[in-house]
Structures are given as C-alpha cells and as structure tokens.
Image (cartoon, rainbow, N blue to C red):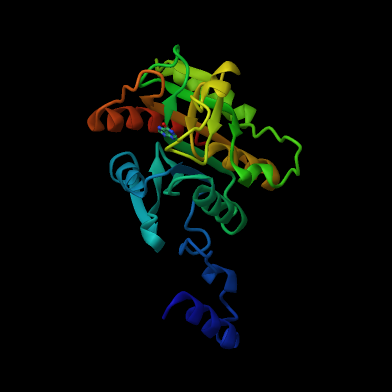
Amino acid sequence: MNRDVEYKYLLDHSDLFLSLPLYFYIMSIHIEAKQGEIADFVLLPGDPLRAKYIADNLLTEAVCYNNVRGMLGYTGYFNGKRVSVQGTGMGLPSHMIYATELINDYKVKTLIRIGTCGGLLEEIKLRDVVIAISASTDSSAVGRYFQGMTFAPTASFRLVQLAVANAAKMNMPVEVGNILSSDLFYHFSEEGDAYELWRRYGTLAVEMESAGLYMLASRLGIEALSLLTVSDHLLTGEHVSAEERQLNFTNMTKLALSLAE
Ligand code: HPA
C-alpha cells in the first residue's frame, strides 16, 4: 500500500485501531519514518551517501528510516547516545524542506549541518573546520520573509561554545565567524568578483544552506549549528582530493557527534 492509501485505510478503519495511537503511522511528505524512529539530535549532510557512510562507519545499530527520493536517513548510536543522520540535498530550498519536516513532524530538537564550503579569505585554508556563528545570504528564501528588513540568521550560542570546547579537546583547529549561504554555486557575476563585497565584511567562506537552517531554527524554536570543512578556495582555486575530502569530513563529523547529549 502506498502511504496515502495506507493513511486513508487507517482513517477509514480507525475503529479497528483504537488501541494504537494513529500518529504512529503519520509520516511527512519527504520522510517515510514513523513517529519515534528519528532521534532528537540529527546530523544533516547534503549528500545522502554521506549519511550512509556515517551510519556504516561511525554509528552502531544504525537502521535506515528513509529512502524517499533516495534521500537516505538513519538512526543509530554514538557513544551510547541516540542520533540520526539525514541527507538534505543542496541549496536552501531542499535543505529547508528536510529541516522543517524534522522539526514540525518529528519533533527534532537539535539540527547540526555538516558540509563543505569554499574559502573566501586568505587566512582561511583548505581543510580548515569553520564553525558558522552566523550565515549571511543572497537567497530570497530568507529575504522574502522580512520585506526589505534584514534578519540575522544565527547559530545556537550553546552549540557554538560546546563545539569550540570539544574541538580544542580533540586538538582540531577551528575558525569561528560569519559565512555566506548562496543560492549559486556557479556565480557568473556581471560586476567582477562576486565575493569581493562579502570578503570586505570578513565573511569566512561560502556554502549553500546554513542561513535557511538558522532562520528555521529561530522561527521553530530549536537549536542549530553548521560545521563546514573547506574543500576548495575561491581566491587560490585550490581544492582537496576526493580521499582527503572524506577524511576531513569524517573528523568534522566526529566533532558534530560530540555535541549529542
Ligand atoms: N560555493 C558554494 N558552496 C560550496 C562551495 C563553493 O565554492 N564549496 C563547497 N560548497
């Protein structure tokens, strides 16, 4: 039975199921997990195969709860703590669909984006871990809500502090500051370097999701943080190899998992 048919069947036959709370069967539009199958604490990689990699290599007892659109999601344990990891796809619109459904439909309390970014400043080096204290954006997904005014999408201060402290314990150098969440990966600017303005204001790096996540976290009352590894540099044109990308990503994921309570 597909999900809509299954739901209608349950409603039509609800007298048969009086002993079972109906909400156990209600799923969201893009996530097919049943209630209770997703942990309160969820890591959000953009790439669903990264979610699988994390489940296979860093979690124990991991169970896959989502394969809708191939956007894999798993729940398992890290150091005895129950955690989930959910792919989100790329860009604010896709990321915000998953974040909204996790918060509204699955009552998730903490969302940690783990991703890659492009370095913007000279002092930001390939492989650095960036903790995004705030995320500026060129995306209308944030701007359209505020009708010409400017909202500042900001991370959870508690999670920033904890991430900085845990990174120090793990001997992992981090950079903490503002980043840019852009709608564009390929930026064909008509006026020279598209990122120069952002550099002048000290923006460390560019990625494509965090401002949407931080705005939703503020609106819907949960805690969020983005951790990013620098995979390419927009001043020098350098980028890390695929294997190094994976290794750096795994180290940063361990930092993200250390934030689970
Ligand atoms: N631009 C946007 N997002 C990114 C980049 C980039 O150069 N690198 C990794 N994520």
Q: What residue is rendered at 58% in x and 88% in y?
A: 12
Q: In this view, which residue lies farthest toward the top?
A: 123
Residue 128, placed above or below residue 241:
above
Residue 101, placed above or below residue 95:
below
Looking at the image, how many numbered discs can be counted on the residues? 0
**Residue 216 placement, left or right of 29:** right
Q: Is residue 108 visible?
A: yes
Residue 253, placed above or below residue 40:
above
Q: What residue is rendered at 60% in x and 87% in y?
A: 15
Q: Examine the image and state in which quarter residue 123 appears.
A: top left
Quarter of image, ligand 1: top left
Q: In this view, which residue lies farthest toward the front?
A: 190
Q: Which percent across, then down, holds residue 9?
A: 52, 85
Who is closer to the viewer here, 225 or 22? 225
Who is closer to the viewer here, 173 or 245? 245
Q: What residue is rendered at 30% in x and 30% in y?
A: 245
Q: Which percent across, then down, holds residue 26?
A: 55, 69
**Residue 254 placement, left or right of 100:** left
Residue 259, placed above or below residue 203:
below
Q: Examine the image and state in which quarter residue 79 appears.
A: top left
Q: Where's the N terminus, which quadrant?
A: bottom left
Q: Is residue 258 visible?
A: no
Q: Examine the image and state in which quarter residue 225 appears.
A: top right
Who is closer to the viewer here, 53 or 201? 201
Q: Which percent across, then down, holds residue 208?
A: 49, 38
Q: What residue is rendered at 73% in x and 34% in y?
A: 150
Q: Which percent across, then down, holds residue 125?
A: 39, 16
